[in-house]
Image: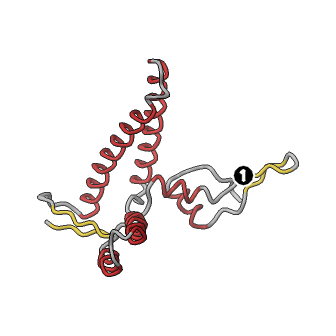
Amino acid sequence: MLYLYEDADLAVEEQKTLYRLLEEGAIDRETLNQRLKRADRILILSSITAPPQEIYDLYKSRNLVENHFAAFKSLIQADKLYLRDATAVFGHIFIRFLCLYLYCRILNRIKQAGLSAHLSPQGLFLKLSKVYSVIYEEEKRMTEIPKQVRGIAEKLKLDIFPNT
């Protein structure tokens, strides 16, 4: 079975790469235009017959594991010059493990809310970063919470904003 998906996050990433390649002279304008037409598409050929959302989730979870493993491995390699003893290495690995654990918890919450096709943990953090908590003259205030951010927080059952 052949599945075709459009991924907005992937499109942004690919567009940045393509424009960088154009600036470097690695591709010409015609090649850029051809590749931009396909920039946000993922084509999956699978022997599994399942609903499209399930196939997409399987792809994303497999890709997620591979990306985290590669990132974890490269971080350990990059930081081993600074980690001079076993205690520092174990501490570093433990902190990375906690980060991965929290990332997966957030991802699971996004999946349970049915938002995994539209939202990633990075995307969630980006949206939540639009809200600021400010302390002025010993009074704590929160900036205006956009409707979209409040809606996402409600769908994810995040109790982080005051009820106003």
Which quarter shows the C terminus? bottom right
Q: From the viewer's side, name the closer residue of 147 and 83.
A: 83
Q: Is residue 76 above or below residue 41?
A: above
Which quarter shows the N terminus? bottom left
Q: From the viewer's side, name the closer residue of 115 and 28.
A: 28
Q: Is residue 143 above or below residue 31?
A: above
Q: Residue furthest right?
A: 137
Query: Is 118 left, or right, of 160 in this rendering?
Result: left
Q: Residue furthest left?
A: 47
In the rendered image, residue 150, in percent from the top left (x then y), is placed at 59, 61
Q: Is residue 8 above or below residue 137?
A: below
Tag 1 secondary structure: strand
Which residue is denoted by mark 1 in the rendering? 133
Q: Residue furthest front?
A: 25
Give the quarter of the image for residue 45.
Answer: bottom left
In the rendered image, residue 136, in percent from the top left (x then y), is placed at 84, 51
Query: Residue shown at 33%/42% (left/top)?
Result: 70
Q: From the viewer's side, name the closer residue of 27 and 123.
A: 27
In the rendered image, residue 25, in percent from the top left (x then y), is placed at 37, 70
Which amino acid lies under the numbered mark 1 shown in the image of this protein?
Ser
Q: How is the image coloured?
A: secondary structure
Query: Residue shown at 28%/59% (left/top)?
Result: 56
Q: Is residue 123 above or below residue 87?
A: below
Q: From the viewer's side, name the closer residue of 77 and 117.
A: 77
What is the total number of numbered labels drawn onto the structure image? Answer: 1
